[in-house]
Image (cartoon, rainbow, N blue to C red):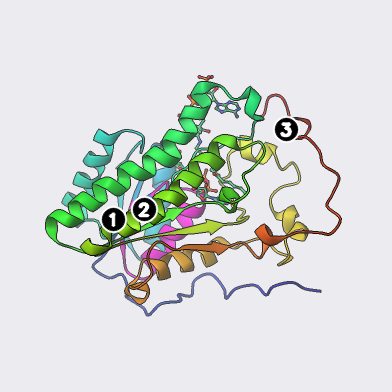
Amino acid sequence: MSGLPEPPQKGRTMLPSGTYVGKVVMVTGGGTGLGKAMATEFARLGATVAIASRSAEHRANGVRAVEEAGGRAVDVALDVRDAAQVAAAFDQITQAAGPVDVLINNAAGNFPIPAERLSPNGWKAVVDIVLTGAFLCSQEFARRCVARGAPGSILNILVTYIDGGAPGHSHSAAAKAGVASLTETLAVEWAPDGIRVNAISPGLFPHDDHTASMRANRPDGYEAEWNRIPALRVGRTHELGWLATYLCSPYAAYITGHTAVIDGGDRLRRSVRMPVFVPIRELIPETPR
Ligand code: HXC
Ligand code: NAP
């Protein structure tokens, strides 16, 4: 059995060449991992891509990836938890490249920890980045689209454990489920203004930028998880990038309030004989920093 086939090679596009020429795409957390992969695919289709996050080093990596794919990049320092910084980021992008046409709410915080050990500030850090950050960026984006009478597209990056929760990730699961709800609410509120709001719910997508604490939860590495997934492989970051470019494009003009799952069937995996139950506190080391 060889599982689901690999996607076409990285470097191809799934939309016509130049689909995003003249468009400005803002990717929060666009300097690492999935954000960088999505930024790359928008750039390949001609977009100007704003890489918005806290670390200058991360942003420089995102800028390099966009430029290597043939796009123009804007480097924007941003902590999505701060409304004033969010407004300033949109101002900076508008000045440098023009108004933002597509917003990707990809920035996230996460670390594995049993709920009873999570501090109030740890809870707040993750919920503020994931849920409040997505709301603040979406609100600023929509206000500006409405003011100039222009359509727009928002894409929220969720995770498959929005359904069923995630032991060891109470903060992230609750916050991402909140963003799933926002996706549906804002899609309805803003459709009359020409703004679409969709989401992608990814399964496992290994990349080189995973944080140390996330890696600590998977001592054998993310690639080693392939045989736990019905597809018998993990996701490739460029295939997620293709899905993002489609959902934000004019070819998806009638799609809004939708969450597209891309997980090789992982979330549906059930067995008539489930594995022995192990409490989460026995699976997560005491000091996972
Ligand atoms: C326990 C931790 C912790 C850890 C931080 N904290 N890391 N507690 N275990 N590993 C606690 C701190 O002690 C502090 O609480 C509080 O969280 C805030 O920590 P700061 O470092 O001050 O916060 P900040 O600088 O704002 O950083 C936010 C962060 C950090 C979330 C904590 O990890 C971060 O910036 N992460 C960004 C990248 C990331 O997390 N990527 C993962 C996305 S992957 P106290 O009480 O001490 O003050 C994902 C889905 C993966 O989401 C799904 C895979 C299948
Ligand atoms: P990652 O590499 O750790 O990316 C997280 C990004 O968020 C970083 O670039 C970080 O940049 C940015 N960020 C964090 N806090 C921020 C803040 N306060 N303000 C602005 N930017 C901030 O993780 P990833 O795996 O690529 O994950 C990307 C998205 O996919 C996340 O939403 C995640 O939940 C989701 N996801 C990932 C997987 C997977 O398998 N990889 C699976 C499901 C869902 P700075 O440090 O520079 O701020």
* Disc 1 crowd, CA 10 A, few/some/many (<14, 14-19, 20+): few
Q: Earlier in the sequence, mark 2 or mark 3?
A: 2
Q: If the image is split into quadrants, where does the C terminus sit? A: top right
Q: CA distance from mark 2 to mark 1?
A: 6 Å
* Residue type, label 2: Thr
Q: Is mark 2 within 8 Å of ligand 2?
A: no
**Looking at the picture, how far across and down is residue 137, in whole percent?**
31, 45
* Residue type, label 1: Glu
Q: Which region shows up in magenta?
A: 28-50
Circle 1 sits on which residue? 189
**Looking at the picture, how far across and down is residue 61, in whole percent?**
44, 48
Q: Earlier in the sequence, mark 1 or mark 3?
A: 1
Give the residue displayed 39% in from the left and 59% down from the top.
Answer: 66
Residue 220 seen anywhere in this rendered image of the structure: yes
* Residue type, label 3: Ile
Give the residue displayed 45% in from the left and 75% down from the top.
Answer: 13
Give the residue displayed 60% in from the left and 56% down from the top.
Answer: 205
Tag on residue 185?
Answer: 2
**Looking at the picture, how far across and down is residue 18, in whole percent?**
32, 75
CB under 8 Å between callouts 2 and 3? no
Residue 38, magenta (yes or no): yes
Q: CA distance from mark 1 to mark 3?
A: 41 Å
CB under 8 Å between callouts 2 and 1? yes
Q: If the image is split into quadrants, where does the N terminus sit? A: bottom right
The answer to whether 181 appears left or right of 204 in the picture is: left
Query: Quadrant location of residue 264?
Result: bottom right
* Disc 3 crowd, CA 10 A, few/some/many (<14, 14-19, 20+): some
Q: Is mark 1 within 8 Å of ligand 2?
A: no
